[in-house]
Image (cartoon, helix red, strand yellow):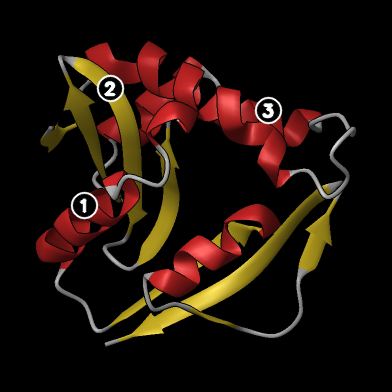
Amino acid sequence: MKIRIAVSNDVKSISNLVQSLSHYYLKERDGILPQWFLATLTNHAFLERIESFEYLNYVIEKNNIIIGYISIKNKSHLYHLFVVEKCQGQGVARRLWEHAMSQCKNTIYTLRSSLYAVPIYKKLGFVELGAAQEKKGIGFQEMKLTL
């Protein structure tokens, strides 16, 4: 597996990866993703983040296929961390996270986890901040990691 900086040619693969897992953000499993949320998952939205100096974006590949993606905002906020379902539970997310941290070198990191991913982030050392929240059908948990 190889980790590298995400580039504009990766946008379609990244968008497809994240969209394939975005249902995990829904508070109700049979709900519909709200339009405001879908707008953050378009090719254009990913391209803007990849081209922005505010974000660090990395992909991890296996056999030249993107199997994971991470985006860090302002070197301290974990914006996205996604791994294709068939590769979950194999340490891919941890490898991406550790790589991103080595590039950011901060002592405090924050994120808004899907309710589904809270246990994964706890394994990475994050703790919950307050109660779970909801924004127009999207359930999330604010979390923080202090090194």
> Amino acid under label 3?
Leu
| Of the image marks 2 and 3, the number of the one nearer the N terminus | 3
Judge from the rendering whether residue 39 lies leftward or rightward of residue 111; answer left or right: right
Mark 1, residue position: 95
> Is residue 110 visible to the viewer in this orientation of the structure?
no
The residue located at (54%, 20%) in the rendering is: 42
Residue 17 percent across, percent down from the top left? 46, 23
| Of the image marks 1 and 2, the number of the one nearer the N terminus | 2
Mark 3, residue position: 38
The image quadrant where one finds the C terminus is bottom left
Residue 30 percent across, percent down from the top left? 89, 32
Task: Report the Cα–Cα distance between label 1 and label 2.
Answer: 14 Å
Residue 33 percent across, percent down from the top left? 79, 31
Q: Is residue 37 above or below residue 127?
A: above
**Secondary structure at numbered mark 2:** strand
**Secondary structure at numbered mark 3:** helix
Circles 2, 3 touching at the beta carbon (< 8 Å): no
Q: Is residue 138 above or below residue 5?
A: below
Residue 107 percent across, percent down from the top left? 24, 84
The residue located at (19%, 26%) in the rendering is: 61
Task: Report the Cα–Cα distance between label 2 and label 3.
Answer: 21 Å
Task: Report the Cα–Cα distance between label 1 and label 3.
Answer: 27 Å
Mark 2, residue position: 66
**Secondary structure at numbered mark 1:** helix
Q: Which mark is residue 109?
A: none
Circles 1, 3 touching at the beta carbon (< 8 Å): no
For discs 2 and 3, the disc positioned in front in the rendered view: 2
> Amino acid under label 1?
Arg
For discs 1 and 3, the disc positioned in front in the rendered view: 1
The residue located at (14%, 35%) in the rendering is: 5
